Amino acid sequence: MRGRKSGQRVSDSHMEGVRSIEKTLSVLASVVGERRTPSPGVSDPAVLLETCLARLEEDGAALSRPIRTIHHLSCTGGTLFAKCIAAMPNILLLNEVDPLSTLLLQEGKPAFAPTDMISLVRQGDPELTSDVLVRMFAKDIEFLAHDQARIGRDIVLRDHSHSHFLIGATIAERPTLREMVADVSAVNSVVTVRDPIDSYLSMVANGWQLQFSPSTFDEYCRRYQAFLDRYEGIDIIRYEDLVDDPKSTMHRICTILDLTYSDDFVDLFSAFTLSGDSGRSGSAIGKRSRRESAAQLADMTRNSNNYTKLAQSLGYAIV
């Protein structure tokens, strides 16, 4: 799917308005010239038009602001990251987004989804191409981003990367969330990670490793690396850094995403309730100890070449 970007459309409309106002100013100047003397209490028309031009330029800049996306696999601390971002000023967070997810689809059993247009379209025509679904999603996001920009709010999408990389016998060949959004807007993105040992053990505790096959630690690490490869070049933030130093880590994320930062998130994040909160929750950000013994960990990692490569690439100590 390719076409004119949202930013281009906004820019074209904005420039048409600018040219119209500039033309009006030119005509006004040629007719009135130096003889214009506004009546008492009445603003100079040229001043009003110049004010409108400045406002139009401000509106054009606001409407061209990027959409933000955050990407991570399940059980890597993503919900904590998302809550902390949602607690920043003027944010609308959309949680666990993936218009191409098939996780909740059940063959022969239509779901009740009166507000979910993509699910309804899929039920109406199961053979519909993913391109149609992506275009529907892109239009919705484009509209929402423009609408929220008018009131000074930024859109942040938290990806549900699990649906793409940790479901089924193979990794689906299809666009990532960032690629879908990039077709209609500029995008600022960040990837968050966690030590693969801890995230895999947490997945096992939830039984989610059974959603891909083979459901081994080595296969998990292979898919983890595939996820990272699709987001190559995007800044990576470690979950461990967040719990060690929440404020500086969130300040860095806000800088990457070009969002307004506030220390107040430390007191506010726990007020947000999000789906995907599968870990050990709480109102304080802090370290959690591993529950497995060293012998169990060594047995899990001993024969995994994919683990060794992944841990080295992310800077984690190899067990």
Image (spheres, rainbow, N blue to C red):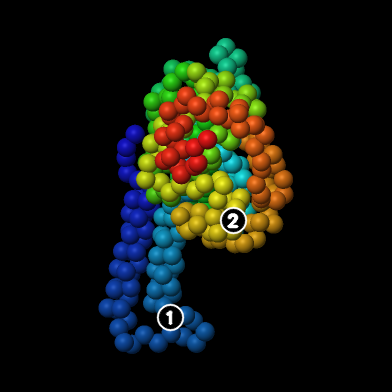
Distance CA(mark 2)–CA(mark 1): 55 Å
Reading the image, the residue beneath label 2 is: 245
Q: Residue at x 55, y 59 (%)?
A: 248
The nearer-to-camera label among 2 and 1 is 2
Q: Residue at x 66, y 56 (%)?
A: 266
Q: Amino acid at mark 2?
A: Asp
Q: Position of residue 204 (x, y in %)?
A: 61, 26
Q: Residue at x 43, y 40 (%)?
A: 312
Please identify the quarter of the rendering in which residue 60 is found. Answer: bottom left
250 or 17: nearer the viewer: 250
Please identify the quarter of the rendering in which residue 35 is found. Answer: bottom left
9 or 69: nearer the viewer: 69
Q: Residue at x 59, y 56 (%)?
A: 245
Up/down of 45 relative to 12, above or below: below
211 or 116: nearer the viewer: 211
Label 2 packing within 10 angstroms: few (<14), some (14-19), many (20+): few
Q: Position of residue 261 (x, y in %)?
A: 56, 61
Q: Amino acid at mark 1?
A: Asp
Helix, strand or loop status at disc 1? loop
Reading the image, the residue beneath label 1 is: 44
